[in-house]
Image: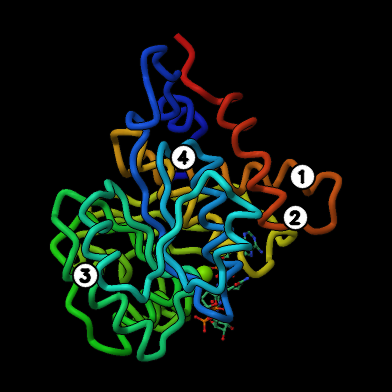
Amino acid sequence: MKNIDLSVVKNTIRVRPNDSYKGTYGKVGLIGGNTNFGGAIIMATEAALNSGAGLITTLTDPVNLTSLHDHAPEAMFANYNDDSELEKLIPTFNVIVIGPGLGTNKNSLKIISKVFKLVNNKQILVIDSSAITMINQYDLTLPDNQIIFTPHQMEWQRLSGIKISDQNEDNNMKVVNKLDSIVVLKSHHTEIYNKEKVFKNPGGTPAQATGGMGDTLAGMIGGFVAQFSNEYNAVLSAVFLHSAIADELAKNQYVVLPTHIIQRIPEFMKKYEKKG
Ligand SMILES: NC(=O)C1=CN([C@@H]2O[C@H](COP(=O)(O)OP(=O)(O)OC[C@H]3O[C@@H](n4cnc5c(N)ncnc54)[C@H](O)[C@@H]3O)[C@@H](O)[C@H]2O)[C@@H](O)CC1
Ligand SMILES: Nc1ncnc2c1ncn2[C@@H]1O[C@H](COP(=O)(O)OP(=O)(O)O)[C@@H](O)[C@H]1O
Ligand SMILES: [Mg+2]
């Protein structure tokens, strides 16, 4: 299995055209954050914003509104329990990130089912955390979209049926082929699959083993695929940068928090934007 190479990142992050505007950089909807896990969708939102997505709407429980706007006033808000809001907004997004902090109860199921019904097949879906767990738990039918799954090993076990101890390239690839999707299998060395290939992330540190680290990555991936045309390379670049920032910070920090990484994304993207 090949390692992700910095050249992919450098060829993916383009210099912004002078005549571009917010609409050039994609409309991202992030769905999640129940009454217990508001922080998850707020971190995903901040990560997508700092990755450069043009317009962001966070669909979450209203209890999170004040905190969301305190952290990310750039993001718009909608109540994910309001069906008419979902019906109005879901068709307007280029990319939808669903799952961070969504939970797995009956209300979470109602929301994911509604979203899966409302999406159109031009939209890219990033399916993370609770949303992955619910696919197996409630036997959900996946919509006919380009899907990027971002499971950790236990979530991959639930989605694929492959036990963590049996998760290897051959076994994983068989399921990825059936899913016909991109799968970001997160661990201390994250692997990124599509039907044709798999790359391993060479970076990452135990300093980043903190709740919210994957929620942050899901937001970054949403922001990257909203802007950069080759989806697989955009995903590779987001995964690489997420841990490259952590590795850099870990030189001087015992722990690296998701919010530390989020603050450094624009600086690292500038460092690696495509020159010439
Ligand atoms: N601040 C917040 O609001 C946070 C909310 N979170 C949300 O909490 C919900 C539950 O997600 P969790 O992932 O905590 O719970 P899960 O129950 O989905 O997964 C955790 C279980 O998986 C096992 N596991 C095995 N290999 C693992 C690996 N490589 N990485 C992680 N776990 C592994 C763990 O031992 C544990 O039993 C999600 O909606 C998530 O988005 C978490 O992300 C934590 C932070
Ligand atoms: N020891 C480690 N080395 C490298 N990366 C790690 C390590 N532990 C966790 N990570 C990274 O942190 C993230 C954890 O994702 P996840 O478990 O979904 O977090 P959460 O759901 O709490 O946001 C993944 O990107 C994973 O690669
Ligand atoms: Mg997670």
Q: Which residue is mark 1?
A: 249
| Residue carrying label 3 | 116
Against 263, is 184 above or below?
A: below
Q: In the picture, residue 126 is in which quadrant? A: bottom left
**Label located before the other in sequence (3 or 1):** 3
Residue named by callout 4: 237
Relative image position of residue 229 (x, y in whole percent):
29, 33
Residue located 42% across and 47% down the image: 56
Mark linked to residue 256: 2
Label at residue 186: none
- Give, as a three-letter code, the residue at label 3: Phe
Q: CA distance from mark 3 to mark 1?
A: 38 Å
Judging from the image, what secondary structure is the residue with disc 3 in?
Answer: helix
Question: Of discs 3 and 1, which sits in the foreground?
Answer: 3
Q: Tell me if label 2 and label 1 are in contact, CB under 8 Å.
A: yes
Q: Is the residue at mark 2 in contact range of ligand 2, meaning its CB lies under 8 Å from it?
A: no
The 10 Å Cα crowd at callout 1, few under 14, some 14 to 19, many 20 or more, is many
Q: Residue at x 33, y 78 (%)?
A: 159
The answer to whether the residues at label 4 and label 1 have Cβ atoms under 8 Å apart is no
Nearer-the-camera pick, 51 or 206: 51
* Frontmost residue, 171 versus 240: 240
Q: How far apart, in angstroms, are the residues tagged by discs 2 and 1?
A: 7 Å
